[in-house]
């Protein structure tokens, strides 16, 4: 069984910073890519940033403010969020595309989500 567990969300003032972490655990053979998505009630989940062997990509709305990084040895992905704005308020979800031990193909896994609220 594979689990993704996020941490690091919370309440922060506009202009502040937060760092999200997501650890993948279980019978994992290899992780192809990891990413952060976010969702506001009533709206579709959107990609914030992703990272794989070919590099990182970001939503236009967070470029220059957010940085995604990955520690392959720890099966962990981070999202450093700086210069936060009220419109960044959302539930942030970790995503991984990975192959379980003895599995023939990669599958998608999601974390449970962590709330980020940017407000004064």
Image (cartoon, rainbow, N blue to C red):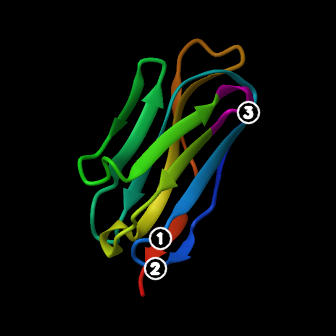
The earlier-in-sequence mark between 2 and 3 is: 2
Residue 38 coordinates in the image, percent (x, y): 40, 57
How many angstroms separate mark 2 from mark 3 (CA)? 30 Å
Residue pointed to by mark 1 = 16
Residue 67 within the magenta-colored segment of the rendering: no
Looking at the rendered structure, the secondary structure element under dot 3 is helix
Q: With respect to residue 98, does 62 lie above or below?
A: below
Q: Is residue 75 magenta?
A: yes
Q: Nearer the viewer, mark 2 or mark 3?
A: 2
Residue at screen point 62% across, 62% down = 8
Q: Is residue 119 above or below residue 25?
A: below
Q: Quadrant of the C terminus?
A: bottom left
Q: Residue at x 40, y 67 (%)?
A: 84
Circle 1 — which element? loop
Q: Judge whether residue 8 can be spotted in this image.
A: yes
Magenta-tinted stretch = 72-76
- Quarter assignment of residue 25: top right
- Crowdedness near tag 3: few (<14), some (14–19) or many (≥20) residues, C-alpha within 10 Å: few
Q: Dot 2 corresponds to which residue?
A: 13
| Residue marked by disc 3 | 74
Q: Residue at x 57, y 73 (%)?
A: 10
């Amino acid at each position: 069984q594979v689990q993704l567990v996020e941490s690091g969300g919370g309440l922060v003032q506009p202009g502040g910073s937060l760092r999200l972490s997501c650890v993948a655990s279980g019978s994992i053979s290899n992780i192809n890519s990891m990413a952060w998505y976010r969702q506001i009630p009533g709206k579709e989940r959107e990609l914030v940033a992703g990272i794989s062997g070919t590099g990182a990509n970001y939503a236009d709305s967070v470029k220059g403010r957010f940085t995604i990084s990955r520690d392959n040895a720890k099966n962990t992905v981070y999202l450093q969020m700086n210069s936060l704005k009220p419109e960044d308020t959302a539930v942030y979800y970790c995503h991984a595309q990975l192959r379980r031990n003895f599995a023939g193909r990669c599958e998608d896994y999601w974390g449970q989500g962590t709330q980020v609220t940017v407000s004064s």
